[in-house]
Amino acid sequence: NAGVMQNPRHLVRRRGQEARLRCSPMKGHSHVYWYRQLPEEGLKFMVYLQKENIIDESGMPKERFSAEFPKEGPSILRIQQVVRGDSAAYFCASSPGRETYNSPLHFGNGTRLTVT
Amino acid sequence: QKEVEQDPGPLSVPEGAIVSLNCTYSNSAFQYFMWYRQYSRKGPELLMYTYSSGNKEDGRFTAQVDKSSKYISLFIRDSQPSDSATYLCAMCPYNQGGKLIFGQGTELSVKP
């Protein structure tokens, strides 16, 4: 899925540090979604953003997690004061529009966060 | 009870076999149904996408949706070793955009 670019591919952080995950959507896509995949669990929705707006953050943990999608540049998922339970694969997906019928999601290859 | 149930497997079949992968769901508001394939250490890749009951075919893959039974299936004909991956079903209501609910994923291994 080369269209949606995520970096870094792997990120190691010690407990208490900050993690920043970046996502560049496919060309022409202005809708970005972040998902988390914990070991032995399925993908879980975290947040949905359009340029400069958070549309739905119902899946985001209440503390330490934040996301943005500025007018210029990639979308950023930020995790402050990481804990071991944050270790997971974080996937970004993009679509050209909101309506699923015409805009199925395309995923990037993810960032694998390891907290030591 | 999870909104989407999927047998995690693992499922092992010989090359050339017909594979049947299934998901059940509880939320009658789900209108869009997808199957994704995920290779190890990669992101999910969209395989099939449908929004109505019935069958949809694409090459060796057939997606089947039965909304009355809240049951979806993916059939893979003439399975190949390259089909070895984890298969994820996903679905969402009409007005929820890309807020997909995923099954746990079924790990498939096709032996040569």
Image (cartoon, rainbow, N blue to C red):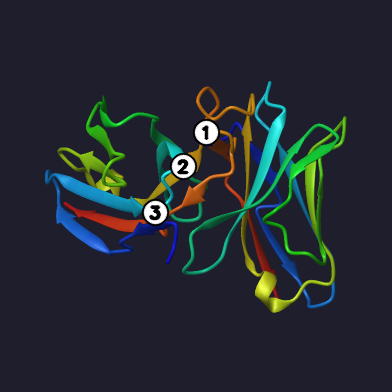
Q: Is residue A116 visible?
A: no
C-alpha distance separating marks 3 and 2: 9 Å
| Residue type indicated by callout 1 | Tyr
Figure quadrant of residue A108 = top right
Question: On the same chain: label 1 and label 2?
Answer: yes
Left or right, residue A25 beside residue B10: right
Report x, y in % for residue B23.
Answer: 32, 52
Report x, y in % for residue B54.
Answer: 25, 30
Left or right, residue B20 beside residue A107: left
Residue displayed at 47% across by 52% down? B102
Residue displayed at 72% across by 27% down? A30
- Mark 3 vs 1, N-terminal side: 3
Which mark, by number, is residue B94?
1
C-alpha distance separating marks 1 and 2: 7 Å
- Mark 1 vs 2, N-terminal side: 2
Q: Are marks 1 and 2 in contact (CB under 8 Å)?
A: yes
Report x, y in % for residue B96.
Answer: 59, 38
The answer to whether B62 is drawn above or below residue A12 in the figure is above
| Residue type indicated by callout 3 | Ser
Residue displayed at 24% across by 26% down? B59
Report x, y in % for residue B22.
Answer: 27, 51
In this view, the residue in front, B27 or B20, is B27
- Which chain does the numbered disc 3 sit on? B
For label 3, the residue is B26
